[in-house]
Amino acid sequence: RWRDGLPDSMHGVVVENGHVTKLMLSSNNLTGRLPDVFAQLPQLRVLYLSHNRLSGALPPSLGSLLLLEHLDLSHNKFSGAIPDQWGGMLSLKRLLLDHNSLTSSVPSTLNCLCKLKWIDLTHNRMTGPLPDFLDFVPVRRPTNGRVAWWLGEAAETNSSGKAGGGGKAKIVRHEQ
C-alpha cells in the first residue's frame, strides 16, 4: 500500500549518483491509485509495477518523465484512457499496459514516442481505430486466438507487402 507517496518497503529501488533511476516493485501486492510522486523523479529510467492490484486512472504526470525508458504497469486494475500527456515520455522504448481495464483508443500523442520499440495493450477494453502513425502487420499469436494489439519490432510483411523492422516500431493486430 502507498503511504505518503512512497511504498512501505524500499527493496527494488536503484539509486545512482543520488537519483532514483529504477523502481522495480512488481508482484508486491500494492493496492490503490498510482501516486503523482513518480513525476518528482526526473532521473527515473525504469518503472516496473506489474502484477499488483493498482487501480484507477493512469496518472498524466508520468508524461513529464523525459528519461523513462521502460514502463510496465501490466496485470493491474487500471481503468480509463491512456493520458495524452504520455506523449512527453520521449525516451520510452517499452510500454506494457496489458491485462488492465483500459478503455478508449490509443492517443495520437504517442506519435511523439520515436524511440518506442514495444507496446503491449492486450487484454484491455480499448476501442476505436489505432492512430495512423502505427503501421499494421497482421499476425496470429499462437498462444491464444483472441484479438489483441501489441507493438514490437517485426520482420513480417504488412498488407502492402513492405517488410517491417529496420528499427521502426510496428503495431501488430492479432486476429482470430
Image: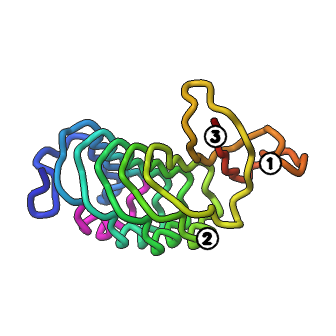
Q: Find residue 174 and name its label.
A: 3
Q: Please tell me which residue is depicted at 80% across the width and 46% down the height of the picture.
A: 164
Q: Quadrant of residue 36?
A: bottom left
Q: Amino acid at mark 2?
A: Cys
Q: Position of residue 94 (x, y in %)?
A: 53, 50
Residue linked to disc 2: 112
Q: How is the image coloured?
A: rainbow
Q: Please tell me which residue is depicted at 29% across the width and 70% down the height of the picture.
A: 40
Judging depth in this view, the residue of 110 and 66 nearest the camera is 110
- SS type, badge 2: helix
Q: Position of residue 126 (x, y in %)?
A: 48, 57
- SS type, badge 1: loop
Q: Position of residue 21 (x, y in %)?
A: 37, 54
Count residues near mark 1 (Cα–Cα under 10 Å), then give few for <14, some for 14-19, many for 20+: few
Q: Amino acid at mark 3?
A: His
Residue linked to disc 1: 166
Q: Amino acid at mark 1?
A: Gly
